[in-house]
Amino acid sequence: MKVARPVAVLALAAGLIACGGAKNEDAAQKENDVHKTEMAKSGIEMAKGEKTIYYTCPMESHKHIHSEESGSCPECGMGLVAVVATDEEDAEFYTCPMPEHSHIRHSEAGKCEECGMKLVPVRKMPG
């Protein structure tokens, strides 16, 4: 019986973690759906499978600016544009998937020099 208790606790913990992950995925999907609707209203369409990662200033000199929501660049006031994960053939550049490393941008696939994560292909959505 002593073995059964830790197994039950682990099973319960795994179930709670899985449920929490599903809720987070659902919230992210709803947010992405809202973004797609907003984009469609403005005549901009996201390609199938694309997902907004963050918003950034369209100025290359302000590439360090990133936000989880659309808005204005705090440095120049320009409207932030969505950076979406896409496939390699539509990629404008590759970036680290960590928001803290969004300033990492390369023209080819590789790894983030700050954390070692695989760079993802992305493109900026016109604003």
Image (cartoon, rainbow, N blue to C red):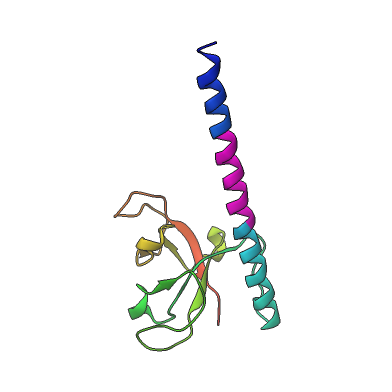
Hey, which residue is sitting farthest top in the picture? 1
- The quarter of the image holding the C terminus is bottom right
- In percent of the image, x 44 and y 80: which residue is there? 58
x, y percentage for residue 53?
Answer: 51, 64
In the drawing, does residue 28 fall left or right of residue 78? right
Q: What is the chief secondary structure element of the magenta stretch?
A: helix
Q: Magenta residues, as a range?
A: 14-26
- In percent of the image, x 62 and y 51: which residue is there? 23
- The quarter of the image holding the N terminus is top right
Asked whether 109 or 48 is in front, the reply is 48
Hey, which residue is sitting farthest left in the picture? 114
In the drawing, does residue 80 fall left or right of residue 28? left
Task: Decide whether residue 21 is among the magenta residues.
Answer: yes
- In percent of the image, x 48 and y 80: which residue is there? 80
In the drawing, does residue 103 fall left or right of residue 10? left
x, y percentage for residue 64?
Answer: 34, 72
Task: Decide whether residue 107 is among the magenta residues.
Answer: no
x, y percentage for residue 124?
Answer: 51, 73
Hey, which residue is sitting farthest bottom in the picture? 77
